[in-house]
Image (cartoon, rainbow, N blue to C red):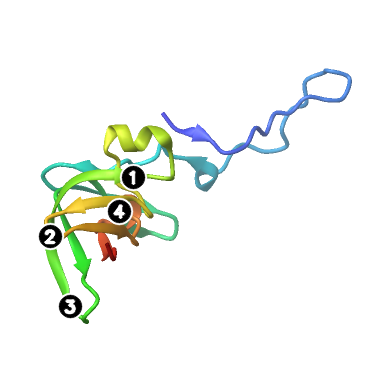
């Protein structure tokens, strides 16, 4: 079941029903958000507009961590510490862009979009 982005059948100022001039296009429908969690890696690939592909993460347990000295390490995710996107995401452990994660190397901030890119890139935070 897809959510619609907009309501094409609006009402008139008198309260009467206004019939839309056209039907909703396929690209105008919205999907439910993909919310990656901390577990063994599971990805899904979906077709998007223009016959392109998006690889989304359902779950992941490692992060590509930029340490600062021109090195990138693969580090294990321990837990989600903060998530400013949604207050509920911190409790549920959802990983989104801007989330603060606890890794084996220390705290890091996610800079990629795991629900759309299929990868988690992060920058190590200074303590």
Q: Is residue 102 left or right of residue 10?
A: left
Left or right of 94, for residue 73 = left
**Where in the figure is residue 121, as x and y percent of width and height?**
26, 63
Residue at image position (28%, 66%) is 126
Q: Nearer the viewer, mark 1 or mark 3?
A: 1
Determine which residue is flagged by label 1: 82
Which is in the foreground here, disc 4 or disc 3? 3
Q: Earlier in the sequence, mark 2 or mark 1?
A: 2
Q: Is residue 35 above or below residue 113?
A: above
Instruction: Determine the CA span between mark 4 and mark 3.
Output: 21 Å
- Left-right relation of 16 to 8: right
Foreground mark, 2 or 4? 2
Circle 1 residues within 10 Å: few <14, some 14–19, many ≥20 = many
Q: Quadrant of the C terminus?
A: bottom left
Task: State the residue position of label 3.
Answer: 71
What whole-number distance in Å separates the C-alpha atoms at marks 4 and 1? 16 Å
- Between 22 and 37, the one nearer to me in the picture: 37
Disc nearest the viewer among 2 and 1: 1
């Amino acid at each position: 079941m897809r959510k619609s982005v907009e309501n094409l059948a609006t009402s008139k100022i008198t309260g009467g029903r206004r019939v839309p001039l056209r039907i909703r296009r396929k690209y105008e429908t919205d999907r439910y958000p993909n919310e990656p969690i901390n577990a063994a890696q599971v990805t899904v690939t979906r077709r998007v507009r223009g016959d392109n592909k998006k690889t989304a993460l359902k779950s992941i347990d490692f992060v590509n961590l930029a340490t600062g000295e021109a090195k990138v390490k693969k580090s294990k995710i321990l837990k989600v510490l903060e998530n400013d996107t949604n207050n509920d995401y911190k409790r549920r452990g959802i990983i989104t862009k801007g989330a603060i994660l606890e890794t084996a190397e220390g705290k890091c901030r996610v800079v990629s979009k795991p629900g759309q890119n299929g990868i988690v890139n992060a920058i190590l935070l200074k303590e």
